Amino acid sequence: MNLPVDLINSLQSVKGFSREAFEKEHASPEKVTSIRINPYKWSTSSLPLLFPSLERTGIPWCETGYYLSVRPSFTPDPFFHAGCYYVQEASSMFLEQVIKAVFPGHEQARLRILDLCAAPGGKTTHLSALFPEGFIVANEVIKTRAGILAENVVRWGKENIIVTSNDPAAFNRLQGYFDLVVADAPCSGSGMFRKDPESIKEWSPQHVDLCSKRQKRIIEDCWPSLKENGIFIYATCSYSVKENEEVLDWIADTFEVDTVSVPHAAADGIVETVSDRNTMYGYRFYPDKIKGEGFFIACMRKKGHIDEQIPDPKRLVMASKQDRNIISPFLTNPEQYELVYTGREVDILKKCNMDDIAALYPVLYIKKPGIRAGKIMKDELIPSHELALSTIIALNLRGIDADPETALEYLRKKDFSADNASKGWNVVRFMGHNLGWVKILPNRINNYYPSALRILKH
Protein backbone atom coordinates (compact mmCIF):
# COMPACT_ATOMS: atom_id res chain seq x y z
CA MET A 1 0.00 0.00 0.00
CA ASN A 2 1.63 3.23 -1.20
CA LEU A 3 0.37 5.89 1.17
CA PRO A 4 0.37 9.48 -0.15
CA VAL A 5 3.68 11.16 0.65
CA ASP A 6 1.93 14.48 1.23
CA LEU A 7 -0.31 12.87 3.86
CA ILE A 8 2.62 11.29 5.70
CA ASN A 9 4.57 14.54 5.67
CA SER A 10 1.58 16.49 6.98
CA LEU A 11 1.26 14.18 9.99
CA GLN A 12 4.90 14.20 11.17
CA SER A 13 4.30 16.67 14.00
CA VAL A 14 0.76 15.54 14.90
CA LYS A 15 0.35 14.09 18.38
CA GLY A 16 0.26 10.31 18.43
CA PHE A 17 1.59 9.80 14.89
CA SER A 18 4.41 7.30 14.45
CA ARG A 19 5.41 6.93 10.81
CA GLU A 20 7.02 3.51 11.14
CA ALA A 21 4.14 1.97 13.10
CA PHE A 22 1.54 3.69 10.90
CA GLU A 23 3.06 2.42 7.64
CA LYS A 24 3.62 -1.05 9.06
CA GLU A 25 -0.03 -1.32 10.11
CA HIS A 26 -1.22 -0.21 6.68
CA ALA A 27 1.05 -2.81 5.06
CA SER A 28 -0.45 -5.59 7.18
CA PRO A 29 -3.02 -7.85 5.45
CA GLU A 30 -5.03 -8.16 8.69
CA LYS A 31 -8.53 -6.70 8.52
CA VAL A 32 -10.65 -5.64 11.49
CA THR A 33 -14.33 -6.64 11.49
CA SER A 34 -16.76 -5.47 14.13
CA ILE A 35 -20.48 -5.54 14.81
CA ARG A 36 -22.83 -3.81 17.24
CA ILE A 37 -25.73 -5.73 18.75
CA ASN A 38 -29.26 -4.35 18.38
CA PRO A 39 -30.40 -4.26 22.04
CA TYR A 40 -34.06 -4.06 20.98
CA LYS A 41 -33.79 -7.45 19.25
CA TRP A 42 -30.86 -9.25 20.85
CA SER A 43 -29.20 -9.64 24.21
CA THR A 44 -25.51 -10.03 24.96
CA SER A 45 -26.34 -13.26 26.80
CA SER A 46 -27.41 -14.74 23.44
CA LEU A 47 -24.16 -13.70 21.77
CA PRO A 48 -22.91 -17.31 21.30
CA LEU A 49 -25.73 -17.88 18.78
CA LEU A 50 -24.18 -15.26 16.46
CA PHE A 51 -21.32 -16.71 14.39
CA PRO A 52 -20.79 -19.66 16.77
CA SER A 53 -17.61 -20.75 14.96
CA LEU A 54 -15.91 -17.36 15.38
CA GLU A 55 -14.09 -15.80 18.30
CA ARG A 56 -15.78 -12.64 19.61
CA THR A 57 -14.19 -10.04 21.88
CA GLY A 58 -15.73 -6.90 23.30
CA ILE A 59 -14.92 -3.41 22.05
CA PRO A 60 -13.74 -1.49 25.14
CA TRP A 61 -15.63 1.75 24.39
CA CYS A 62 -18.98 0.21 23.35
CA GLU A 63 -21.03 -2.09 25.58
CA THR A 64 -22.78 -3.77 22.64
CA GLY A 65 -19.83 -3.76 20.22
CA TYR A 66 -17.77 -6.86 19.36
CA TYR A 67 -14.79 -7.71 17.22
CA LEU A 68 -15.02 -10.84 15.08
CA SER A 69 -11.88 -12.93 14.57
CA VAL A 70 -12.49 -13.09 10.79
CA ARG A 71 -14.96 -11.39 8.46
CA PRO A 72 -17.81 -13.79 7.66
CA SER A 73 -20.23 -13.41 4.77
CA PHE A 74 -23.11 -11.47 6.32
CA THR A 75 -25.37 -11.87 3.27
CA PRO A 76 -26.57 -15.42 3.99
CA ASP A 77 -27.13 -14.78 7.70
CA PRO A 78 -30.86 -14.50 8.54
CA PHE A 79 -30.00 -12.67 11.78
CA PHE A 80 -28.47 -9.87 9.68
CA HIS A 81 -31.63 -9.48 7.61
CA ALA A 82 -33.72 -9.54 10.80
CA GLY A 83 -31.74 -6.55 12.11
CA CYS A 84 -30.24 -8.32 15.11
CA TYR A 85 -26.93 -6.52 14.65
CA TYR A 86 -25.29 -3.76 12.62
CA VAL A 87 -21.90 -4.14 10.92
CA GLN A 88 -19.97 -1.03 11.94
CA GLU A 89 -16.39 0.15 12.13
CA ALA A 90 -15.20 -0.11 15.75
CA SER A 91 -13.59 3.33 16.08
CA SER A 92 -16.84 5.15 15.28
CA MET A 93 -18.55 3.35 18.15
CA PHE A 94 -16.62 5.71 20.48
CA LEU A 95 -19.64 7.96 20.03
CA GLU A 96 -21.05 6.03 23.00
CA GLN A 97 -18.36 7.34 25.37
CA VAL A 98 -18.92 10.91 24.21
CA ILE A 99 -22.66 10.57 24.86
CA LYS A 100 -22.05 9.12 28.32
CA ALA A 101 -19.73 12.04 29.15
CA VAL A 102 -22.33 14.71 28.37
CA PHE A 103 -25.65 12.91 28.99
CA PRO A 104 -25.29 10.76 32.14
CA GLY A 105 -29.00 9.88 32.12
CA HIS A 106 -29.23 9.28 28.39
CA GLU A 107 -31.39 6.15 28.72
CA GLN A 108 -34.32 8.22 30.00
CA ALA A 109 -33.63 11.46 28.14
CA ARG A 110 -36.37 12.71 25.82
CA LEU A 111 -34.11 14.73 23.52
CA ARG A 112 -34.39 16.03 19.98
CA ILE A 113 -31.37 14.69 18.10
CA LEU A 114 -30.10 15.38 14.59
CA ASP A 115 -27.72 13.01 12.82
CA LEU A 116 -26.88 15.41 10.01
CA CYS A 117 -24.85 13.24 7.61
CA ALA A 118 -26.38 9.94 8.60
CA ALA A 119 -25.88 7.40 5.79
CA PRO A 120 -25.39 4.50 5.92
CA GLY A 121 -26.83 4.53 9.46
CA GLY A 122 -24.19 3.39 11.93
CA LYS A 123 -24.39 6.42 14.21
CA THR A 124 -28.16 6.73 13.71
CA THR A 125 -28.83 3.23 14.98
CA HIS A 126 -26.29 3.70 17.77
CA LEU A 127 -28.05 6.90 18.87
CA SER A 128 -31.35 5.03 18.77
CA ALA A 129 -29.91 2.44 21.16
CA LEU A 130 -28.43 5.06 23.49
CA PHE A 131 -31.60 7.21 23.58
CA PRO A 132 -34.62 4.86 23.70
CA GLU A 133 -36.87 7.84 24.49
CA GLY A 134 -35.19 10.22 22.07
CA PHE A 135 -36.58 11.73 18.86
CA ILE A 136 -33.90 11.11 16.24
CA VAL A 137 -33.84 12.85 12.86
CA ALA A 138 -31.50 10.96 10.52
CA ASN A 139 -30.68 13.16 7.54
CA GLU A 140 -28.81 12.38 4.34
CA VAL A 141 -28.70 14.88 1.49
CA ILE A 142 -27.68 12.40 -1.26
CA LYS A 143 -30.85 10.62 -2.40
CA THR A 144 -29.27 7.23 -3.15
CA ARG A 145 -27.51 7.17 0.19
CA ALA A 146 -30.74 8.24 1.90
CA GLY A 147 -32.30 5.07 0.49
CA ILE A 148 -29.55 2.93 2.02
CA LEU A 149 -30.01 4.78 5.32
CA ALA A 150 -33.74 4.05 5.27
CA GLU A 151 -33.10 0.34 4.58
CA ASN A 152 -30.80 0.08 7.59
CA VAL A 153 -33.26 1.97 9.79
CA VAL A 154 -36.03 -0.43 8.71
CA ARG A 155 -33.87 -3.40 9.72
CA TRP A 156 -33.11 -1.74 13.05
CA GLY A 157 -36.86 -1.65 13.68
CA LYS A 158 -37.10 1.05 16.36
CA GLU A 159 -39.83 3.69 16.02
CA ASN A 160 -37.79 6.60 17.44
CA ILE A 161 -36.04 7.40 14.12
CA ILE A 162 -37.34 9.47 11.22
CA VAL A 163 -35.38 9.67 7.96
CA THR A 164 -35.05 12.94 6.02
CA SER A 165 -33.14 13.97 2.90
CA ASN A 166 -32.20 17.64 2.94
CA ASP A 167 -29.30 20.00 2.47
CA PRO A 168 -27.96 21.13 5.86
CA ALA A 169 -29.13 24.68 5.06
CA ALA A 170 -32.76 23.48 5.39
CA PHE A 171 -32.26 23.16 9.15
CA ASN A 172 -31.72 26.92 9.41
CA ARG A 173 -35.48 27.30 9.82
CA LEU A 174 -35.48 25.19 13.00
CA GLN A 175 -33.67 27.65 15.25
CA GLY A 176 -32.85 26.44 18.73
CA TYR A 177 -34.63 23.12 18.11
CA PHE A 178 -32.16 20.27 18.69
CA ASP A 179 -30.56 19.23 21.99
CA LEU A 180 -27.84 17.29 20.17
CA VAL A 181 -26.42 17.53 16.64
CA VAL A 182 -23.99 14.89 15.34
CA ALA A 183 -22.10 15.76 12.15
CA ASP A 184 -19.97 12.93 10.79
CA ALA A 185 -18.91 15.19 7.97
CA PRO A 186 -17.90 14.14 4.44
CA CYS A 187 -14.11 14.04 4.37
CA SER A 188 -11.06 13.01 2.37
CA GLY A 189 -11.31 9.49 3.80
CA SER A 190 -7.68 8.81 4.72
CA GLY A 191 -8.79 6.95 7.84
CA MET A 192 -10.36 4.26 5.66
CA PHE A 193 -7.33 3.50 3.45
CA ARG A 194 -6.90 0.05 5.02
CA LYS A 195 -10.50 -0.92 4.29
CA ASP A 196 -10.59 0.71 0.86
CA PRO A 197 -7.12 0.94 -0.72
CA GLU A 198 -8.64 2.24 -3.95
CA SER A 199 -9.58 5.46 -2.17
CA ILE A 200 -5.87 6.34 -1.98
CA LYS A 201 -6.04 7.31 -5.65
CA GLU A 202 -8.65 9.96 -4.86
CA TRP A 203 -6.70 11.58 -2.02
CA SER A 204 -4.81 14.83 -2.58
CA PRO A 205 -4.01 18.01 -0.60
CA GLN A 206 -6.49 19.81 -2.86
CA HIS A 207 -9.21 17.35 -1.92
CA VAL A 208 -8.43 17.93 1.77
CA ASP A 209 -8.80 21.69 1.23
CA LEU A 210 -12.12 21.17 -0.54
CA CYS A 211 -13.41 18.90 2.24
CA SER A 212 -12.39 21.39 4.92
CA LYS A 213 -14.38 24.14 3.22
CA ARG A 214 -17.38 21.83 2.82
CA GLN A 215 -17.21 20.79 6.48
CA LYS A 216 -17.27 24.43 7.62
CA ARG A 217 -20.24 25.19 5.36
CA ILE A 218 -22.17 22.21 6.73
CA ILE A 219 -21.51 23.29 10.32
CA GLU A 220 -22.39 26.92 9.61
CA ASP A 221 -25.64 25.87 7.92
CA CYS A 222 -26.88 23.65 10.74
CA TRP A 223 -25.54 25.64 13.72
CA PRO A 224 -28.70 27.77 14.27
CA SER A 225 -30.75 24.57 14.76
CA LEU A 226 -28.81 23.71 17.95
CA LYS A 227 -30.31 25.17 21.11
CA GLU A 228 -28.45 27.08 23.83
CA ASN A 229 -26.32 24.65 25.88
CA GLY A 230 -26.94 22.03 23.22
CA ILE A 231 -24.21 19.52 22.35
CA PHE A 232 -22.43 19.43 18.98
CA ILE A 233 -20.40 16.33 18.08
CA TYR A 234 -18.08 16.57 15.09
CA ALA A 235 -16.42 13.56 13.47
CA THR A 236 -14.47 12.55 10.36
CA CYS A 237 -12.64 9.48 9.09
CA SER A 238 -9.65 11.64 8.13
CA TYR A 239 -6.21 12.08 9.69
CA SER A 240 -5.69 15.58 8.27
CA VAL A 241 -5.34 18.41 10.79
CA LYS A 242 -7.02 20.73 8.30
CA GLU A 243 -10.20 18.63 8.53
CA ASN A 244 -10.01 18.06 12.26
CA GLU A 245 -8.22 20.35 14.74
CA GLU A 246 -8.28 23.33 12.37
CA VAL A 247 -12.04 22.93 11.92
CA LEU A 248 -12.41 22.92 15.72
CA ASP A 249 -10.46 26.18 15.91
CA TRP A 250 -12.67 27.65 13.19
CA ILE A 251 -15.79 26.66 15.18
CA ALA A 252 -14.39 28.33 18.32
CA ASP A 253 -13.50 31.45 16.31
CA THR A 254 -16.92 31.63 14.67
CA PHE A 255 -19.31 30.64 17.47
CA GLU A 256 -19.48 30.69 21.26
CA VAL A 257 -18.63 27.20 22.50
CA ASP A 258 -17.13 25.31 25.42
CA THR A 259 -14.96 22.34 24.56
CA VAL A 260 -15.80 19.01 26.22
CA SER A 261 -13.30 16.32 27.18
CA VAL A 262 -14.04 12.59 27.45
CA PRO A 263 -12.66 11.02 30.66
CA HIS A 264 -10.30 8.03 30.48
CA ALA A 265 -10.24 7.91 26.66
CA ALA A 266 -6.45 7.59 26.54
CA ALA A 267 -6.61 4.34 28.53
CA ASP A 268 -7.80 2.52 25.40
CA GLY A 269 -5.00 3.78 23.14
CA ILE A 270 -7.00 6.74 21.85
CA VAL A 271 -4.96 9.93 21.47
CA GLU A 272 -6.37 13.10 23.02
CA THR A 273 -5.33 16.23 21.13
CA VAL A 274 -5.97 19.95 21.58
CA SER A 275 -6.25 22.51 18.80
CA ASP A 276 -3.54 25.13 18.47
CA ARG A 277 -5.44 28.38 18.91
CA ASN A 278 -8.42 27.59 21.13
CA THR A 279 -7.40 24.41 23.01
CA MET A 280 -10.37 22.44 21.70
CA TYR A 281 -10.28 18.76 22.70
CA GLY A 282 -10.34 16.09 19.99
CA TYR A 283 -9.77 12.33 19.89
CA ARG A 284 -7.65 10.61 17.27
CA PHE A 285 -7.79 6.91 16.43
CA TYR A 286 -4.66 5.42 14.82
CA PRO A 287 -4.85 1.77 13.64
CA ASP A 288 -1.40 1.07 15.08
CA LYS A 289 -2.66 2.09 18.55
CA ILE A 290 -6.22 0.75 18.62
CA LYS A 291 -8.05 -2.11 16.92
CA GLY A 292 -9.99 -0.16 14.34
CA GLU A 293 -9.67 2.32 11.49
CA GLY A 294 -8.64 5.97 11.44
CA PHE A 295 -11.17 8.29 13.05
CA PHE A 296 -11.49 11.69 14.71
CA ILE A 297 -14.22 12.93 17.04
CA ALA A 298 -14.76 16.04 19.16
CA CYS A 299 -17.51 17.39 21.37
CA MET A 300 -18.52 20.91 22.40
CA ARG A 301 -21.34 22.75 24.11
CA LYS A 302 -23.04 25.71 22.41
CA LYS A 303 -23.09 28.96 24.35
CA GLY A 304 -25.07 32.11 23.66
CA HIS A 305 -28.83 32.57 23.79
CA ILE A 306 -31.01 31.63 20.84
CA ASP A 307 -34.82 31.77 20.74
CA GLU A 308 -36.58 28.65 19.53
CA GLN A 309 -38.27 29.31 16.19
CA ILE A 310 -40.35 26.57 14.60
CA PRO A 311 -42.68 27.05 11.60
CA ASP A 312 -46.40 26.36 11.98
CA PRO A 313 -46.98 22.59 11.99
CA LYS A 314 -48.55 20.69 9.15
CA ARG A 315 -51.98 19.24 9.82
CA LEU A 316 -51.57 15.48 9.55
CA VAL A 317 -54.36 13.29 8.16
CA MET A 318 -55.34 10.78 10.82
CA ALA A 319 -56.51 7.28 9.93
CA SER A 320 -60.20 6.52 10.30
CA LYS A 321 -61.53 4.57 13.25
CA GLN A 322 -62.31 1.68 10.92
CA ASP A 323 -58.74 1.54 9.58
CA ARG A 324 -57.38 1.86 13.11
CA ASN A 325 -59.42 -1.17 14.15
CA ILE A 326 -57.92 -3.12 11.24
CA ILE A 327 -54.31 -2.20 12.07
CA SER A 328 -54.37 -2.25 15.89
CA PRO A 329 -54.26 -6.08 16.20
CA PHE A 330 -50.87 -6.00 14.46
CA LEU A 331 -49.36 -3.83 17.23
CA THR A 332 -48.12 -4.67 20.71
CA ASN A 333 -49.32 -1.46 22.37
CA PRO A 334 -51.62 0.28 19.86
CA GLU A 335 -52.69 2.89 22.42
CA GLN A 336 -49.17 4.41 22.29
CA TYR A 337 -49.38 5.24 18.59
CA GLU A 338 -51.23 7.40 16.11
CA LEU A 339 -51.99 6.20 12.59
CA VAL A 340 -51.46 8.75 9.83
CA TYR A 341 -52.21 8.58 6.12
CA THR A 342 -49.18 9.21 3.90
CA GLY A 343 -50.60 9.06 0.41
CA ARG A 344 -52.27 5.67 0.05
CA GLU A 345 -50.26 4.14 2.90
CA VAL A 346 -50.65 4.33 6.68
CA ASP A 347 -47.71 5.19 8.94
CA ILE A 348 -47.47 4.44 12.66
CA LEU A 349 -46.14 7.34 14.74
CA LYS A 350 -45.47 7.53 18.46
CA LYS A 351 -48.00 9.84 20.10
CA CYS A 352 -45.24 11.69 21.95
CA ASN A 353 -43.54 12.47 18.61
CA MET A 354 -46.59 13.82 16.79
CA ASP A 355 -45.96 17.51 17.48
CA ASP A 356 -42.33 17.21 16.39
CA ILE A 357 -43.13 15.40 13.17
CA ALA A 358 -45.89 17.85 12.30
CA ALA A 359 -43.44 20.74 12.89
CA LEU A 360 -40.81 19.22 10.61
CA TYR A 361 -43.04 18.57 7.60
CA PRO A 362 -43.21 22.25 6.46
CA VAL A 363 -39.40 22.52 6.64
CA LEU A 364 -37.98 19.16 5.54
CA TYR A 365 -38.48 16.43 3.00
CA ILE A 366 -39.35 13.47 5.23
CA LYS A 367 -38.61 10.14 3.59
CA LYS A 368 -39.68 7.95 6.50
CA PRO A 369 -41.71 9.49 9.35
CA GLY A 370 -42.31 6.35 11.39
CA ILE A 371 -43.07 2.66 10.91
CA ARG A 372 -44.99 1.97 7.71
CA ALA A 373 -48.06 -0.12 8.53
CA GLY A 374 -49.04 -0.80 4.95
CA LYS A 375 -52.06 -0.27 2.75
CA ILE A 376 -55.74 -0.87 3.51
CA MET A 377 -57.52 -2.69 0.68
CA LYS A 378 -61.04 -4.11 0.94
CA ASP A 379 -61.03 -3.84 4.73
CA GLU A 380 -57.75 -5.75 4.98
CA LEU A 381 -54.24 -4.55 5.82
CA ILE A 382 -51.61 -5.39 3.23
CA PRO A 383 -48.80 -5.22 5.80
CA SER A 384 -45.47 -3.57 4.98
CA HIS A 385 -42.05 -5.12 5.34
CA GLU A 386 -41.24 -2.34 7.83
CA LEU A 387 -43.97 -3.53 10.14
CA ALA A 388 -42.63 -7.10 10.13
CA LEU A 389 -39.14 -5.94 11.16
CA SER A 390 -40.34 -3.37 13.68
CA THR A 391 -40.10 -3.73 17.45
CA ILE A 392 -43.73 -2.62 17.85
CA ILE A 393 -45.31 -5.56 16.04
CA ALA A 394 -47.62 -7.86 18.03
CA LEU A 395 -45.99 -11.09 19.19
CA ASN A 396 -49.05 -13.31 18.82
CA LEU A 397 -49.48 -13.08 15.04
CA ARG A 398 -49.66 -16.19 12.88
CA GLY A 399 -46.19 -17.23 11.86
CA ILE A 400 -43.92 -19.75 10.18
CA ASP A 401 -40.83 -20.81 12.08
CA ALA A 402 -38.24 -21.32 9.36
CA ASP A 403 -35.18 -23.54 9.59
CA PRO A 404 -31.94 -22.15 8.10
CA GLU A 405 -32.59 -23.58 4.62
CA THR A 406 -36.18 -22.32 4.51
CA ALA A 407 -35.15 -18.92 5.81
CA LEU A 408 -32.62 -18.54 2.98
CA GLU A 409 -35.15 -19.63 0.38
CA TYR A 410 -37.54 -17.02 1.73
CA LEU A 411 -34.83 -14.31 1.67
CA ARG A 412 -34.08 -15.27 -1.95
CA LYS A 413 -37.80 -14.76 -2.66
CA LYS A 414 -38.11 -18.36 -3.77
CA ASP A 415 -40.94 -20.83 -3.32
CA PHE A 416 -40.87 -22.99 -0.22
CA SER A 417 -43.25 -25.31 1.60
CA ALA A 418 -45.00 -24.47 4.87
CA ASP A 419 -46.89 -27.48 6.08
CA ASN A 420 -49.72 -26.87 8.57
CA ALA A 421 -49.42 -23.07 8.23
CA SER A 422 -52.64 -21.13 8.81
CA LYS A 423 -54.32 -19.44 5.86
CA GLY A 424 -53.83 -15.71 5.46
CA TRP A 425 -50.97 -13.44 6.47
CA ASN A 426 -48.06 -15.06 8.32
CA VAL A 427 -44.82 -13.68 9.68
CA VAL A 428 -41.77 -15.70 8.64
CA ARG A 429 -39.49 -16.06 11.65
CA PHE A 430 -36.01 -17.45 12.15
CA MET A 431 -35.27 -18.50 15.72
CA GLY A 432 -37.89 -16.06 16.96
CA HIS A 433 -36.78 -13.09 14.81
CA ASN A 434 -39.04 -11.74 12.08
CA LEU A 435 -37.86 -11.74 8.47
CA GLY A 436 -40.99 -10.61 6.61
CA TRP A 437 -44.42 -11.65 5.35
CA VAL A 438 -46.03 -14.42 3.34
CA LYS A 439 -49.67 -14.95 2.51
CA ILE A 440 -50.92 -18.52 2.60
CA LEU A 441 -53.54 -19.20 -0.06
CA PRO A 442 -55.42 -22.49 -0.69
CA ASN A 443 -53.05 -23.61 -3.43
CA ARG A 444 -49.87 -21.57 -3.03
CA ILE A 445 -47.74 -19.31 -0.83
CA ASN A 446 -47.15 -15.71 -1.87
CA ASN A 447 -43.70 -14.53 -0.80
CA TYR A 448 -43.85 -10.81 0.07
CA TYR A 449 -40.17 -10.29 0.77
CA PRO A 450 -39.15 -7.05 -1.04
CA SER A 451 -37.60 -7.81 -4.42
CA ALA A 452 -34.99 -5.06 -3.97
CA LEU A 453 -33.68 -6.75 -0.79
CA ARG A 454 -33.65 -10.37 -1.93
CA ILE A 455 -30.41 -12.38 -1.66
CA LEU A 456 -28.90 -12.97 -5.09
CA LYS A 457 -25.84 -14.97 -3.99
CA HIS A 458 -25.97 -18.77 -3.60
Image (cartoon, grey):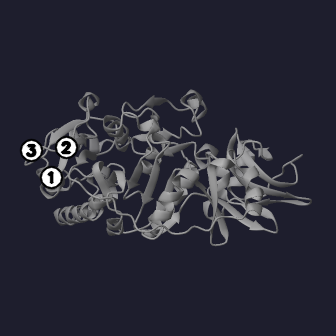
Q: Name the residue under label 1.
A: 252
Q: Is the C-beta separation of discs 3 and 1 under 8 Å?
A: no
The image quadrant where one finds the C terminus is bottom right
Which comes sooner in the sequence, label 3 or label 1?
Answer: 3
Q: Name the residue under label 3.
A: 13
Residue drawn at the location 29% of the way across and 46% of the way down: 295
Placement of 150 over or under 344, stated as above or below: above
- Residue 299's x, y, as percent? 26, 45
Q: Is the C-beta separation of discs 1 and 2 under 8 Å?
A: yes
Residue drawn at the location 56% of the way across and 48% of the way down: 158
Residue 249 shows in this picture: yes
Kind of residue sitting beneath label 3: Ser
Instruction: Return the residue nearer the eye: 76 or 319.
Output: 319
Residue 456 shows in this picture: no
- Residue 7's x, y, as percent? 17, 54
The image's mark for residue 123 is none
Instruction: Return the residue nearer the eye: 4 or 294.
Output: 294
Secondary structure of the residue carrying numbered label 3: loop
Q: Distance between the residues labelled 2 and 3?
A: 23 Å
Which comes sooner in the sequence, label 2 or label 3?
Answer: 3
Answer with left or right where residue 400 lies relative to residue 192.
right
Residue drawn at the location 26% of the way across and 27% of the way down: 267
Secondary structure of the residue carrying numbered label 1: helix
Which class describes the residues within 10 Å of circle 2: few (<14), some (14-19), or many (20+)? some
The image's mark for residue 259 is 2
